[in-house]
Amino acid sequence: MKRSFGQRLKRDRYLLLMFLPVLVYYLVFCYLPMVGIVMGFEDYRMGSGFEGLFTSKWVGLKWFNQFFSSVFSWRLIRNTFLLSFYSLIFGFPIPIIFAIAITQLRSKRFAKAAQVITYLPYFISTVVVVGMMTNFLSPSNGVVNLIIEKMGGKSINFMSDPGWFRKLYVISGSWQSFGFNSIIFVAAIMGIDPALYEAMEVDGASRWQRIIHLILPGISETIILLLIMTLGNLLNVGFEKVYLMYSPAVYETGDVISTYVYRQGIESHKYGYASAVGLFYSAVGFLFVVSSNYLSRKVTGSSLW
Amino acid sequence: MKTSHGSDRVLDVVIWILVIFAVAVTAYPFLYVLSVSISDGAAVARGDVLLLPKGLSLDAFGMVTQYNQLWISYRNTFFYTIFGTLANIVFTCLGAYPLSKRDFSLRKPLNFFVVFTMYFSGGLIPTYIVVTGIGLYNSPLAVILPVLVSTYNMMICRSAMSSVPQDLFENASLEGASDFYQLIHIAIPLIKPTLAVLTLYYAVARYNDFFNAMLYLGDSNLQPLQMFLRRVLILSSSEVLQAAGTDAAAAAAQNTLKIRYVCIVLAAIPIFAITPFVQKYLVSGTMLGAVKG
């Protein structure tokens, strides 16, 4: 009993009605801004609203040329990439190591407590994390510099030193997320068949051998899947965190594409130029996600969505 | 069971050290902040407080809690969090349910319509033009509407709903139950653990939202807690001290740090009070998102 498409639509009218508000949301807040991309090719006048999108003067690739010939483009691309790259290199293995460690603890209660304590920072706001960092590292009364001075060192002005920006970004990011990110690996380790552990024990394997030959292979699929997902979002540097952390003193290492777009667009009202830079950023991000999804289908046989 | 491997003992010790180190590194900043916030001001100014509180003085708590702007921003945050999260969950369920139906006629195109937004976005400036263009600047709706649905969360909700045994819906359908009835009485009750995690994610995101407030709320009477925290913690605003009428510079110098840390304590209380209770859901919810997707 095959129904025609029209009949099926009629049958699904309540499902369609249900989806309607969601459809409107996506149209207004996701797809309308995509139409707004034309701003990147226009000399959009400030305050001209929606109509401005269609009445502004067309300038073609002027803003793109301006961006790529400016002294900032290379610095911004480099900073964006390096912040993500270092976060990945440093941040990715820690949750795996931590997950293995807590599942190997003999005290299950301590393991559970350790898990709860370490995932808590994940839920703290970026403002508070950066606020704590700023105050802890303050050269006048920050606790880190207090300790450095007590040990006879000289206080360091961490937050306005370009050499420290990436380290602070990566370390604080890892501090905030390693516990939460380990949850999935802990679950994967728990999912390994207990009979396999017993078999290894009978064979007289040490715990170290068990980690290498049973646990790591057992969670390798999860590791690969998450690695691919992370790669897909590689260029998604958290705007909020960089924005809250940086200052003109550390633009050299800290200024990224999204913060530059914010300054040029929202603060300096160069909407056309900022949209063009933003479009370049979205396009590169698109390439990353699409290729990571392709990779995931090839490697794990399942695409992410 | 005792094992005969000597290396196991070494490994045990290494693991203990590793976990204790991880816990200490995570907990220390919070303990330190709490200690400073309740210590004697002079001890803090001398730099004596490094881990445990020295002396006891709650004067900074008094100063901060008497500051009106704190309560205004707290009230705003609770308003945005409660109504925002409610709207999030309603919209997420409304979107996820049709997409979870295998024989829904527009399932494929609508699914693509939604998922595409995870790949590509118009970017900051066009979004800003749209939100301000529809008149939302300085409106509470400006922090609620632009983040009504997280596509990722909706996908989690969708896969939870499609793992509900489908004959439950079919039977209800045969008895004449509408789709709305089935969503409310069958789908939602059966995916409660997933919804609990999604509620947590949404509520925390609402509570912590700074970005939308910074973009769209210029009026300080509408601004949420995170904007207040940014002023006090990062921009070193001395508004709390000024409001308290502290005149002596010396008093100010020893109190600024305490006041900032009191603000952190007050901001973290709701988060720390809620999250430990959802741990059992957290594991299942996270698994759903990342593995099944």
Image: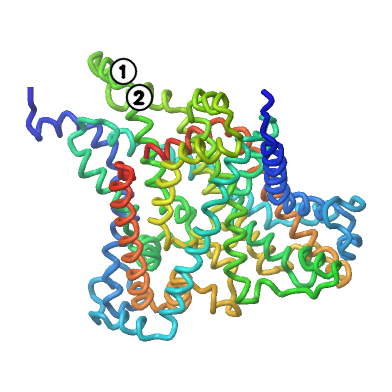
Q: Position of residue A81 (x, y in %)?
A: 45, 68
Relative side of B251 to A112, left or right:
right
Q: Position of residue B78 (x, y in %)?
A: 59, 45
Tell me, what colour scheme is on the image?
A: rainbow
Q: Position of residue B154 (x, y in %)?
A: 38, 41
Which image quarter: residue B134?
bottom left
Element marked by disc 2: loop
> Which of these two is toward me, A28 or A257?
A257
Relative side of B151 to A181, left or right:
left
Query: Residue at label 2?
Result: B164
Mark 1 residue crowding within 10 angstroms, few (<14) / some (14–19) / many (20+) = few
Question: Who's the residue at 10% across and 30% down the image?
Answer: A7
Question: Who's the residue at 27% across and 77% down the image?
Answer: A42
Amino acid beneath label 1: Leu
Query: Residue at label 1?
Result: B168
Amino acid beneath label 2: Val
Q: Chain of mark 1?
A: B
Relative side of A155 to B82, left or right:
right
Relative side of B245 to B103, left or right:
right
Mark 2 residue crowding within 10 angstroms, few (<14) / some (14–19) / many (20+) = some
> Which of these two is toward me, B111 or B128?
B111
